[in-house]
Structures are given as structure tokens and as C-alpha cells.
Image (cartoon, rainbow, N blue to C red):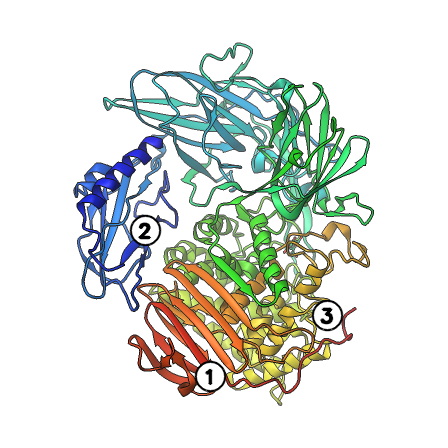
Amino acid sequence: MHRLLLLLTCVLAACSAATPASSAEGLGVQRLRCEYLRDPLGIDETRPRLSWIVTSDKRNQRQTAYQIQVASGIEALADGRPDRWDSGRIESDRTTFVEYAGKPLASRDRCYWRVRCWDAQGVPSDWSEIALWTMGLLEGSDWSAEYVSFADDSPVHKDSESLYLPAARQYRKDFEAAKKVRRATVYATALGVYELHLNGQRIGDRYFAPGWTDYDRRAYYQTYDVTGLVQQGDNALGAWVADGWYSGYVGFGLLVGIGTESIGRYTYGKTPAVLAQLEIEYDDGSRDTISTDASWKVTGEGPIREADLLMGEAYDARRELDGWASPGYDDSRWDPAVLAKDQPRVTAQFVEYRDPEQPGQAPQKHSRPIDLGFQRPRLEAFPGEKVVVTQELPTQSVTRQGEGTYLFDLGQNFAGVIRLKVKGPVGQRVKIRYGEMLHPDGRLMTENLRTARATDFYTLRGDPDGETYQPRFTFHGFQYVELSNFPGEPTKETVTGLALHSDTPLVSELECSDPMVNRLIENIRWTQRANFLDLPTDCPQRDERLGWTGDAQAYVAAAAYNADIGAFYTKWLRELMESQRPGGQFPGYAPYPFQHEWSFGTAWADAGVICPWTIWQAYGDTRVIDHCWPGMVRFMEFHQRTTKDGLGIAHGNSWGDWLAQEDQPPLEYIDTVYKAISAQKMIEMAEATGRDAAADRYRAYLDRLKRAFADKYFDDDGALKLTMQTAYALALQADLVPDELRERAGADLAARIKANGARMATGFLGTRPLLPTLTATGQNDLAVFLLQSHEFPSWGYEIDQGATTIWERWDSYTRDDGFGRHNAAMNSFAHYAFGAVAEWVFADLAGIRADGVGYGRVTIRPMPPTPGSNGDHEPIDWVRARYESIRGPIRSEWRVDGDRFELTAEVPANTTATVHVPADSAESVTLDGAPLGETPGAELTGYEAGRAVVRVGSGVWSFASRHGMGTAEEAITATAEGGE
Ligand code: BGC
């Protein structure tokens, strides 16, 4: 690794010396990515897609052509010998997802690449910095390694009253590297979760590899460059392996009595196994491969006595095997590894629900025999973002709670583990419990963890210099840590929080004049970080942590404003497609370890269309459509099959507008709406990918839904017959309200909200479109009012109760009633669904959105509230927002100052924007202090809806206007109705 860096630096220095710096004034090529990732190792896309951004200090700058060069070696590239691919000069403004079209790629190929572009004046840029991708093992025959495991004579645990938590295993192998090493690469995976070590050092920094898939069918492997770790002479490779999702406790299996033997563990098999292949390339070109096989040694006598994602880890430092992953370690007391394929067959009963065969009946539990023995999954390169520690959270306060018992407050609810520092007598066992909240009397609140034990134990080895512990194979959702049986007096340094999540780059910033809203944005971001952990989960703390599809579809667009989720979702969409039921429906969560109740829930299932569509929209990635297309088509067939008289039906799980504060719209209404939402998205995706016949088919289906919906749900007067807030918001979101009735529907929705004390009443489904549809139908002041509200139910209310994340319920905890309002078991403090409002905050309040897909064109259309429109709070009068799109940074900063409106818009190079400036007339708008029309590159194209519409090229543009909004005639005020 270090050598690569050194080499890279030298070559780059040589490059920049050779190239005049002045080639194109300020036009640069940056952020080179391959399949969304920076310098990914071991990919298996044989036509990987390359993306970059272009930057310029000049306005109206764009790329008119590009050239990509790919070489097998860094020197070759720097010397201008691109032996894999030279695209030559391609006349195109494209900067995203350019498919590699060079020599066919084979396993292990190294591809160094660089890009240059030509600007609007035809001047070439410098070459970009050099980036890298490497190919993984593309053929089954590339693998000589075999899965190894240990002699597992434990009986299948069948008792739901006691936990079965086996020790993590350590595997090792000594080997010799005979000659000078040029390069060393490890490819590895596990049925379970693993961590590799080489010569005493941990390889990489990822947690919970290989990630969760349906291991019976498919698993991911990871690739690591270990060139810097392998030495000429004696070496040792080691692996820790624990149960993970493969055989540990998963989801609510134990709680509801489903899964293998009704206890929710051993979902995919009984005995974890590991597969590792270290390939060494010597300076002389010869090679060696060290593979897991029967010559490896294994022990279960090491320090990790228990290791379970939900239950926690128990670490006995007295059992540490010093030097176990270093050469020369005496492993004579270790056991020989067992080839996983030689493990005996193990049968068990698998219990899950089954959809009824007869209509009108309910799903019933059903049991069938399964084989818990080894099955070799198909391997794929891990396409996502690795889970890593992204932040350390210092303890804010320590409170003594009793003899040896202390409570640590980390000041922020998050997901991850801790670093414990402790000094004390050998054999003392410290118990570590985690909680998101405290009871009013100061005790840790753990009722909401349900059957997740979420407890770690650390047994001291008695080191007089103190000892440090950090769990490897578990994570918790928490803000508070309780240590009991702690020796001595702890300090704040005793516990440090380590936030763990998939390393999706955070891509935005937003600040406005309302501090509560700023905290809200932070809370949403923390909740996303806590739940984007290998897969998008509902919550990180209780015995669930499942890829709930309803939550995912409601939140995915907001997620894309917060972070670059392209690779993360590329991974999870594979699991989502894999989870599809034989009837075509997508289930309530993916992966789908076991069925609970019905396999289908309306609006949850639609994640199978909404999530791929959103990724395509945010990044312009059409391959995601192609990958998901067959599954999406089968799902639409399911939709069509379950359509009656052009409408949806009440079927499956009746989550509906889950956690709404008023009566829900009937399930068949929600089903109709989601059928329409999915159909619309399918039309758009079909059109974008040349599937014209499919687009026609879905258009006909959607027309029929629209007509039937209008007939059934609108009265002669044009009013929606249902009066719930969610009913309006969903109908507007799904475009089921005829154009001429939209404004009316918005006004009716506003009236319903005002009649409810100017309070929301929407649940998981209705909250997401509520503010967007209000804004879109002329009710923006009310939308901003709801955002800023502190009355129950609202985001501000939750923050006033102390929230640092988004809660499952608005009043999961209240200062007045504690946890008393709800069932403790369904009370998560890190659930992102209500955080979907971030989408509106960026798209409407700040006004940053893509015009079309992938931000090639941008719309900047801020939606300030009318001055004086909020009777309870000062309405927001400035916003500063920045979003790092796939085409570069976009900025919208606006301020209302008396009669004056100021807007600074930043548009990435090679894109154009339509900027909508609130103004009493186009004439009152200035750009850089001069009247519009005097600045090249900015063109007034019209005046609509109280806004001057200006087309601009790239660059930073400062507008000012007389906004003409005046002052609201009547301020909105929350009243007691419908609330507290
Ligand atoms: C999860 C949700 C999920 C829901 C289905 C819950 O237990 O935590 O977020 O969508 O079940 O209603």
C-alpha cells in the first residue's frame, strides 16, 4: 500500500513537471470513481463505469470532450502507454458512468486510469490524478481456497429461554514467502463474519465483512492489498470468525418464535466457516498462493467467548493468545481445521409463517425440515461501502450509580461500539450494558431492546499498565453505557463511543435561521448513520435491525441528499431483488431470513421499484434499472394481478400509514396509490432505457388506475371523499388528483391540518409527501410552519424532549410522561422514517433539485415562507445549503431582508441551472448588482408564480430582488385541537 502511494506520488510529481499547469484556465478533472467508489479493489464488473467531475473557476464552463486512458501499470500510464484502453478524444459532455471499453478484463487485472477533458473553448485540461481499480476473481476456478470450519459437535440449540452464544474461532496458518514480494492480495469471505490478521496486524479496517446476503444462495467476498504486510521469509495469516447473520441471532426470530427451531438463530447454517486466498507475486514474476484448507489450525479457546450481533460480545483477556497471527506461534494445542464440505449434515426444523391458500384466512406458522450443513454460495465481489468506525464520541459525563456501577453519557444516540479502558485485578468481569435513554430515576432504559441482550462483558487480564477493549463482532444502538463490577474509579476516558456504519460519504450541509431545524438536520443525519450499517435498517438497537422496505422507500430520497448512497444501495438492491417472493411481491424486509405474518405489505413492497428509481434519479445510473428490471416486472405483474376494477385491494400486512395520529385511509386506498406510484416510476424507467412496449403497458395500466381512482374517491364537487391528511398527501404525491383539482386538494389538505390545530397527523407513508405536496399546491407557508412547529406531533416537539436522533414515534419519550405513552417494546429512538422531511428541506426550502436525472441540469428554486406567516415562531428567513452532487457541488444560499431577497446559487461546471428568484417583477432582479441581461451566461426565460426564471451556466451567481411577498395577511398558529 505504502509503496503504491510512494510510487504514485513520484509519478504524479513527474507528470506535473512534464505538463504545463496552464493548459485550461481552471478546468480540472477530479473525484475519479469507478462504480461509485474511489480506487475499489477486487470488483467483478467486467465493463466498469467510470465517473469524474470537472471543476472550473470560470463561469459557463463545460466539457466538450474527454479522453480516458487505462493502463496495467502506473508507469505505463504516466509514460503515455495506456495498454488497456485509450478512449481517444470523445466529443461528449458526459462525466458519469462511462463504460470501460478497452481490452477484456480478466481476474486480478490492475487498471490505473486517468481522464482529461476539453473545455468550452476546446482547450484541454491537465490529466487528472491517477486512480485505480482492480479486478477480483471472476471465475469459480480462480478459487483454490476451501471453506474451513471447526469440529462442531454442539447440539442444535432449541431452547428459547436460554441463549446459545458460542465462542468466536481463530484460524491460522504459517507460511513462507520465499522471495522478495512485489505484491500480495487477499481475497476472503465467510459464512459468518470475519476479520483477517497478517503478521500480527489487522488487515483493513472493516467490520462485519462479508455483509449480509442470503448465504444459501450468494455471498460477497472482499479484496485486500497486503503488499506492505507480507515479508520475505516467515509469515502468518490469521482469521477471526464469528456467527454474524449466518448463524447468530437475527431480527425478531427469537421474540416471535420463528426461524430455525423457532429461536431465530442458525438462519442459514450451523457452523461458521471462512474462505481466504492470499496471492503473492514475487519480484521475479513467480507466484505463491496461501489458501484456507485442511492444513490450517483452529481454536475456540481464545478470548472472544461470545460474539453475537444482537446479544453482544464476551471477551476474556486472560485467554488472549499473544502472537497468534504472527509467524512461529506455537499452535500445537490448536485443532486441525475441518473442511466445511466435510461437516456432517445437520437437520433441524425451520419455522416461519406461510401465506394462506384460501382467501379470508390468516397466515399461519409452518414448520419444515432444513439442512443446516454447509452449502457453497455463489460468490460476488462486495459492491458496497465497507462498515468502519467513522467517528469517536467522548464521554460527556460519568455518574456513579452504586458500588462499582457507573453510567456514561456520550451525548449523542448512535450505533456502534465502545473503547473501554480499564485497570484492575485479573479475572474481574466488567459488565457493559447499552441504552438509548434513561429512566426518569437515572437508570438505563433497556425495555425497548426486547430480546436483544445488547450486553458485552470484559474479563481483565490484570495488566498493571491498564487494558483496552473494543468489541469486534457486535454493535449496539445507544447513547448511554452502564459499567457494573468496574474496578476503581472511572474517568471520562474510560469509555469512548465509536460510531460504526457503512462509509457512505456525507455530501451535504444545511443551516438556516431556526436552530431547531439545524438540530433536526443533525438528528436525521445521525439516524441515517445509525441505520446504514451494511444495509438500510429500521433501527440499530432492538432485536430487529432488518432491512424494512417501507422505511427504506419512504426515506431513500432524503438519504441521497445526506450521503452518497450509490454503492451502498447497489449492494442492498441485490438483496432486495433476491428477497422477491415467488408470487412477485417484495417482502417487508430484505434480506428475508424468515417470513413473519404475510409476505406482502402494500407500500413496503413498492420499495422494489421506488428505491431503484430513486438511485437512477439521483445519480443517472441506468444500470441499476437494468439489474432490477426483471424483478420489477414480476412485481408489476403481481400488482396487476391484485388489481380489482382498476383499484387496489386490501391484502397482506395492514401496516398502511403506520404510526399515524388519526384514522388511516383504508388499505385498498393505499394499495391503489402505491400501484400508481410504482406504475409511474416503471413508465419513466422504461422510457429511459428504451423499453417502449413496457412503457406503453404501464401507461395503460396507470390510466386505468387514475380513472378508477377519480370515480371512486372524488365527489361530484371535486372534493376527495376521504379526509385524512395522508389520503390527500398520497393522492397528490401519486399524481392521482386531476390537474384542475390539485390546488383545491392542497387547500382542503391545509384546511384539514388547520382544523387539527395546525398539527400533522400523518404516519410513515403520509409524512414523507406532506410538506412537498403542500408546497406544490400553494401551501408553502403551512409546510414551513409544520417544519418549525414544536407542538405535538412534530419534529420540534421531539427535539424539545431531548432527541438527538429521529424517534420511531413523536412521543417515544416525553418530559411529562416518560416512556409511559407507548408500549416499551415498540419504541425505538433511531428510526429514520419521519426523517424523510430532509428531502423537502433540500428540494424545496433550500430549493436544490435535479432537473431530469443525475443533476446534469439543476433547478434552484428556494421556497421562503411569507414574512409574518408563522404566528408561533419567526419564520425561516435564511438558508445556506450545499449538496455535493454526482456532477459537483451545488449551493443555494438565500436570505429575506425586509423587502429584499438575496440568493447565491452555485452550479457545477458542465451543468446548467434554472434559477427561480422570488421577485415582484423580473425587472427588480439584479445579478452581481447589475440588471439582469447585462451578465453573459444568464438569461431571463420568463416570469412565473412570482418568480423570475433565469437560465445560467456553471459558476457562482448572486441574485437580489424585491421579493414582493409582502407580509402574510393571517399568521398560522397552532391550537390545542387534536394535540396535547
Ligand atoms: C419496524 C418498522 C417497520 C414495521 C412494519 C416495525 O417493527 O421497526 O419500522 O416498517 O415494523 O410496520
| Residue 70 image offset from top left, x and y in percent | 23, 44
> Is 747 drawn above or below residue 336 in the view shown?
below
Q: Mark 3: which amino acid? A: Glu
The extreme bottom residue here reads 717
Foreground of the two, 418 or 851: 418
Q: Residue at x 54, y 15 (%)?
A: 335
Mark 3: secondary structure: loop
Q: Quadrant of the C terminus?
A: bottom right
**Rendered-image quarter of ligand 1:** bottom right
Q: Nearer the viewer, mark 3 or mark 1?
A: 1
Residue that mark 3 sits on:
662
Looking at the picture, how far across and down is residue 250, in whole percent?
62, 41
Which circle marks residue 919 in the picture?
Answer: 1
Q: Residue at x 36, y 20 (%)?
A: 231
**Residue type, label 1:** Ala
Compute the Cα span from label 2 to label 1.
Answer: 43 Å
| 440 with respect to 82 (left or right) | right
Q: Earlier in the sequence, mark 3 or mark 2?
A: 2
Q: Position of residue 704 (x, y in %)?
A: 50, 76
